[in-house]
Image (cartoon, coloured by chain):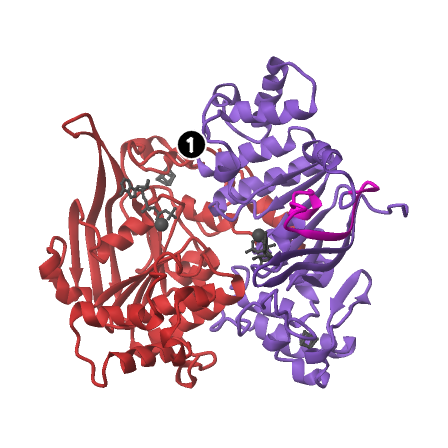
Chain colours: A red, B purple
Amino acid sequence: MTESIAREGVATQTPSKEALLSVQGLQKHFPITKGLFKRQVAAVKAVDGIDFDVYKGETLGLVGESGCGKSTTGRLITRLSEPTGGRITFDGSDISHLGTGAMRPYRRDMQMIFQDPFSSLNPRHTVGAIVGAPFHIQGVKTEHGVKRAVQDLLKLVGLNPEHYNRYPHEFSGGQRQRIGIARTLALKPKLIVADEPVSALDVSIQAQVVNLLEDLQEELGLTYVVIAHDLSVVRHISDRVAVMYLGKIVEVADRESLYSNPRHPYTVALMSAVPVPNPRRRESNQRERVLLTGDVPSPIDPPSGCRFRTRCWKAQEICATTEPPLVVREGDSPDHATACHFPVADNEEVAGRSKAA
Amino acid sequence: MPAPDAFLDVRDLRIHFPTDDGLVKSVDGLNFKLQRGKTLGIVGESGSGKSVTSLGILGLHNKRNARVSGEILLDGTDIVSADPEAVRKMRGRRMAMIFQDPLSAMHPYYTVGHQIVEAYRVHNNVSKAVAKKHAIDLLGRVGIPQPDRRVDDYPHQFSGGMRQRAMIAMALSCDPELLIADEPTTALDVTVQAQILDLMRDLQQEFNSALIIITHDLGVVAELADDVLVMYGGKCIEYGSAVTIFEEPEHPYTWGLLGSMPRLDRGVTNRLMPIKGTPPSLINVPSGCAFHPRCAYEPQTGGRGTTEVPELVESGRGHLVRCHLPVAERKRIWQEQVRPKLEAGS
Ligand SMILES: Nc1ncnc2c1ncn2[C@@H]1O[C@H](COP(=O)(O)OP(=O)(O)OP(=O)(O)O)[C@@H](O)[C@H]1O
Ligand SMILES: Nc1ncnc2c1ncn2[C@@H]1O[C@H](COP(=O)(O)OP(=O)(O)OP(=O)(O)O)[C@@H](O)[C@H]1O
Ligand code: SF4
Ligand code: SF4
Ligand SMILES: [Mg+2]
Ligand SMILES: [Mg+2]
């Protein structure tokens, strides 16, 4: 790690409230077709009408169960995938349906980091070629040549610039993830969407990469959307967190409110399921755990009304008929929105804190 | 043969693989004991030898490419020296394993029920009908809804969590006395993970079996383990009760593990404290203490860390540490330097 970014205990800067990215009614339905003529018989409603903003300079965390639509959302907002509905505004421009050519100027500004540091790097290319590729593809002029630019990037992410000619397999998992990050930074993006950036890494290496992401944000004023299933990592790294369930955002809040005062029953269950690394609290954790039974319903045919109702211990009749809007609930901060008819109150005895039906 | 004083007694276990690049010393002198009804958590960096150890206990290493030495006494019978047929009989009946990836461990072309039935009939001379009834019973016990119907499903018809449950059902089909779970919940969502951990705890209580759980997730260890063994570079570097390892750890690597991990039960810290550097090569293992190239306290041992392999020494009751730093010094560093940093922000 370079000296300039290895500062201890930097306080997170307060992000502005100016949206870099704004999403309204975003939808992605994957068609399921049948027969010779590929007649569409149904659709996987992977993302089914979500709204959120990402403010300049902040980190928005995106969490939720496997298959709830996090990666699809990431691919939509970086326009690696075409939305079936809704609107994406980036830096003031509507990019919802731009074609490849029209997207090109925006491509530089938004980049994605993927989970698997190995499969996303071409094993036959040197580190220099990999990190330098975006310069060539985008035809970007560099002041002192591409090689120098790449070496600067390698230094920035804490890799030895002399390793320019090495191949990915000569690096450890954490180092490979740094190579991926260096490549991402080549075009000085404004927005980085990181899809499970550390979940394939060992705990000790995970912490190095998390710190690096934080340093780079500080240094370069980056805006992040971080997708992860590890709720502790998400809390550590995010300013605000959105919780998804079956193609919908069910709750979004600044991290303090979300973790200290979760309002949506699904968020409550999710938080309570995280194992706490304190053996003395073993029994009380188990007592307080909300166990969700039953499987996640299919995104092809989601439940009517509130999608969580088939697993929710608070469900009433209205939950089956009326979809709860994602709005600020009474007593919550204006940043904290919940999509539930009967949000969990702070001091509420969560019914059957043991096995929820 | 010495009388065993524990149900599982591993003595000076070494598992080495000759390769073109040199001898890989994946496990290099491991000792531990485990009683019935108790749970041992094994943690450590990727590549530290956790899975190789568990495969060794089950006698699953191929003698042609692995050199296994030492003793693994299961209820007094040494698995290392026993003949392969005898070990095969013990597997499934006395000991079983739950693997990380349930899809790869299940055959896609056979129904879940068929696979449990076959696993059961290898060791039990019963009719298919009886075995199937047993399979349905087991699926129900691990929490699969409508087990009599789902027993005829294929693995791909199960969700990830259900597959993992089915794997557990298969591993339990013969009531093993020793169950090894290698990263049993790593591939699962936290909500499903919580169900599986509950299940393992219940089943262990019911059968009084000995359980080894291998994981990267210190939270999972804190939930289940009575004792914790921390591995680094093929060796145990710290061993103690779960409470000791979390509250009074004495090895610099264990401190590093704890510092790397953001925790929900504490306030938000500004900065994680990663272990610098990368995991050691197992072929050219660093001289002296294998952790020394990454250890911030190495200078304090006057160079011994780079030349002399530290012994695993008892530092308190049942607490073993492999480090040259004097015990009092380790306790002081933990109390005065490391712990305050870890707790900052709470
Ligand atoms: N190309 C596709 N065609 C059809 N269905 C798809 C496609 N891509 C994703 N899906 C489906 O969309 C849903 C959401 O998938 P997505 O990958 O976004 O989930 P996720 O939240 O990222 O999950 P994970 O945590 O497992 O990565 C899933 O049901 C998935 O099966
Ligand atoms: N058959 C083999 N031949 C050569 N080397 C091997 C073989 N099996 C394992 N190893 C090596 O032994 C070391 C220990 O591997 P092991 O699978 O036990 O690690 P682990 O602690 O389980 O790691 P992880 O947390 O990543 O699962 C690794 O360096 C691995 O590459
Ligand atoms: S709207 Fe109803 S079913 Fe949905 S989470 Fe709230 S209480 Fe539960
Ligand atoms: S023996 Fe030396 S190098 Fe090894 S852990 Fe202890 S202080 Fe660090
Ligand atoms: Mg995903
Ligand atoms: Mg392993």
Is A203 drawn above or below residue B338 in the view shown? above
In the image: residue A330, left or right of residue B75: left
For mark 1, give the secondary structure: helix
In this orientation, does residue B282 appear? yes
Q: Quadrant of residue B11?
A: bottom right
Q: Position of residue A174 (x, y in %)?
A: 45, 66
Q: Where residue B104 sits: x, y (%)?
A: 49, 39
Please say whether residue A356 is visible from this viewpoint. no
Name the residue at 62% across, 19% down: B131
Q: Of B258 and B96, which appears nearest the observer?
A: B96
Depth check: B69 or B94 in front? B69
Q: How many marks?
A: 1
Q: Does residue A108 appear left or right of residue A344 in this picture?
A: left
The chain carrying label 1 is: B
- The quadrant in which the N terminus of chain A is found is bottom left
Residue B126 drawn above or below residue A226: above
Q: In the image, is A208 to the left or to the right of B282?
A: left
Residue tagged by mark 1?
B156
Amino acid type of the residue tagged 1 in the rendering: His
Stretch in magenta: B55-78
In the rendered view, tell whether residue B238 sits above or below residue A314.
Answer: below
Q: Position of residue A36 (x, y in %)?
A: 16, 26
Tell me, yes or no, whether the highlighted magenta stretch contains residue B65. Answer: yes
Residue plotted at (57% across, 60% down): B20
Residue B39 percent across, percent down from the top left: 70, 47
**Is A168 on the left or on the right of B51, as rendered?**
left
